[in-house]
Amino acid sequence: MAANGNGVSTTPKSPLARIQTQKNGGICHDDSGKPVKAQTIDELHSLQKKRSAPTTPLDGVQGTFATISEDERQRQQLQSISASLASLTRGTGPKVVRGDPAGKVQSVSHVAHHHHIEAPTISVSDSSLKFTHVLYNLSPAELYEQAIKYEKGSFITSTGALATLSGAKTGRSPRDKRVVIDDSTQDELWWGKGSPNIEMDEHTFMVNRERAVDYLNSLDKVFVNDQFLNWDPQNRIKVRIVSARAYHSLFMHNMCIRPTPEELENFGTPDFTIYNAGQFPCNRYTHYMTSSTSIDLNLARREMVILGTQYAGEMKKGLFSVMHYLMPMRQILSLHSGCNMGKDGDVALFFGLSGTGKTTLSTDHNRYLIGDDEHCWSDNGVSNIEGGCYAKCIDLSREKEPDIWNAIKFGTVLENVVFDEHTREVDYGDKSVTENTRAAYPIEYIPNAKIPCVGPHPKNVILLACDAFGVLPPVSKLSLAQTMYHFISGYTALVAGTEDGIKEPTATFSACFGAAFIMLHPTKYAAMLAEKMQKHGATGWLVNTGWSGGSYGSGNRIKLPYTRKIIDAIHSGSLLNATYHKTEVFGLDIPTEIEGVPSEILHPENTVSCHPSLSLFFLWIRLDF
Ligand SMILES: Nc1ncnc2c1ncn2[C@@H]1O[C@H](COP(=O)(O)OP(=O)(O)O)[C@@H](O)[C@H]1O
Ligand SMILES: C=C(OP(=O)(O)O)C(=O)O
Ligand SMILES: [Ca+2]
Ligand SMILES: [Mn+2]
């Protein structure tokens, strides 16, 4: 812009267009719609939300049994939660109210007034004077709001999933898992070498339980989930999860079976309760504690306490341990396996340690998904224990795993992923937080999920071994005896990240392909599996989803598309009738060809000349339980 010596612009200004005001009014007004009915802003806001309708009629049309009033039902529900949160030394539950302390409390203070359990006059403490606000079975939308408002590291990703951080722990802590040893568990459970059950006594459990309960009660609010495990209606287990974080509540909402409103009304007392104190540590001066993390299981009390870890997988896998105890007591086999079913009703199980491909391979666009991780096999067939899936998402791609990719949307919990700060697009290749990035979503997010998640007796039992040494062939057909051998020895690898301290695939022997979760001796599960496979004529297969043609570091992991072709050939029955030859070392039956898979990779001796670890490997494989 040119300026003269006085600093005044010489460019002629173009005048702004004049604003035309209406001649008749004087005040501009928008009369395009009717004005809102509200007189105040608060009133306007109150119009936005309407009350959720009671789900069942209250007039007793349901039956001749006395139906209780909505008020009475809510009173009983709060009393049950207060009982769960009761300090056992003080013998009293906290005053509980429903609703967020920050917002308007639903069923306001008079509810709490009537409904806390009266404290005995002795031992009055500050904590018994305070209210604990209970956020009970919130919806995903409500949990999103709670997480985003109050939990650092919670964000909405570009596809609508809730990104969360699990804190210092990004995998399970198996060395911090303790199980109460008492007169009955001493004889019933598997203890000692190789067992995942590290003992603790009842008293120490109570110390930790009190610590968790006191912590939870000291908070402004706690989340309570009442849900189910096991789609088999005759063997359904009612679980209650008390936690400090919306992230944990949404995770369990997705992972356990979600009750219908009617089922929730009649929930009653839970069969099992988790107290998850998350970030609050255990006290290392407490007997048996070897770190600040403790996951404690008390089967007699039907309770689990979590201190000092926020990794949500502890809750899911902790409940799985419980099922590994409860179900065999009922002659039902619990399985660390994925499960799907073909159009003709042929069911396949996919056993495998974490990260070996249960979720990836059971999620198959051409088959119905029954479940990705935890099942029961009873006289009636198979049933999923859970209501959701928990997929690893490191290097996830739309092309290779389209159904999992599409399941990552509103409602899904995305743990420890890295995303663009502006677009919120997730970079699934980024391991900055951990390699064990995860997505937890309700099973119905997979389009061909089989709901209810039950199926007939399995036809194929596939053992997935992620072989870090590259000595196993990509697939072999197993006799029943071989199936038992591999099931009990459980040769596979621990993949990076799923357990605390594992940085690269590490060879391991994990009995039942889930040694971290079993409670009884491996041979108990194996005997049940053998009996069922024989009775129902199931075929066993060993599929290596790990390295081939060299160990981790030198060879390559078997390509997922090849593994899928192998699995397709098992499902279709074509592999059962293929030509086989026996390997010298294992006596494994290896197919000579499979459609879509290069024949040379089917035989490891073609790719591995003489693996240095091979002899060591055979020394290790021995059943010394
Ligand atoms: N050949 C393969 N078979 C199966 N999974 C593979 C293969 N190669 C790479 N992967 C990857 O390994 C991971 C398997 O994880 P996942 O299916 O979640 O295991 P699990 O459910 O048994 O814990 C996925 O990230 C998958 O993409
Ligand atoms: C969640 C876990 O494993 P999986 O991948 O088998 O679900 C785990 O081991 O903590
Ligand atoms: Ca469906
Ligand atoms: Mn899985």
Image (cartoon, rainbow, N blue to C red):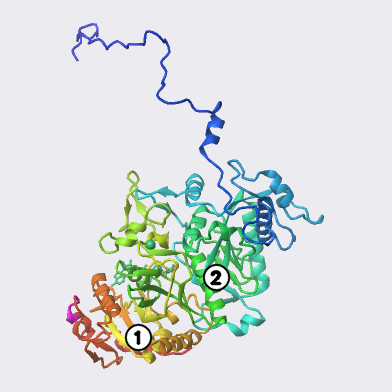
Which mark is on residue 539?
Answer: 1
Asked if residue 179 lies in the magenta stretch, the reply is no
Residue occupying the point 44% across, 81% down: 512
| Dot 2 crowding, Cα within 10 Å, few <14, some 14–19, many 20+ | some
The majority secondary structure of the magenta stretch comes to: loop
Q: Nearer the viewer, residue 536 or 354?
A: 536
Q: Nearer the viewer, residue 507 or 339?
A: 339
- Indicate the position of residue 579 as horizontal and vertical percent values: 21, 89
- CA–CA distance in space, label 2 to label 1: 29 Å
**Picture quarter with ligand 2:** bottom left
User: Is 547 placed left or right of 132 in the picture?
Assistant: left
Which mark is on residue 236?
Answer: 2
Q: Is residue 471 visible?
A: no
Residue type at mark 2? Arg
Q: Residue furthest right?
A: 121
Highlighted range, magenta? 596-600
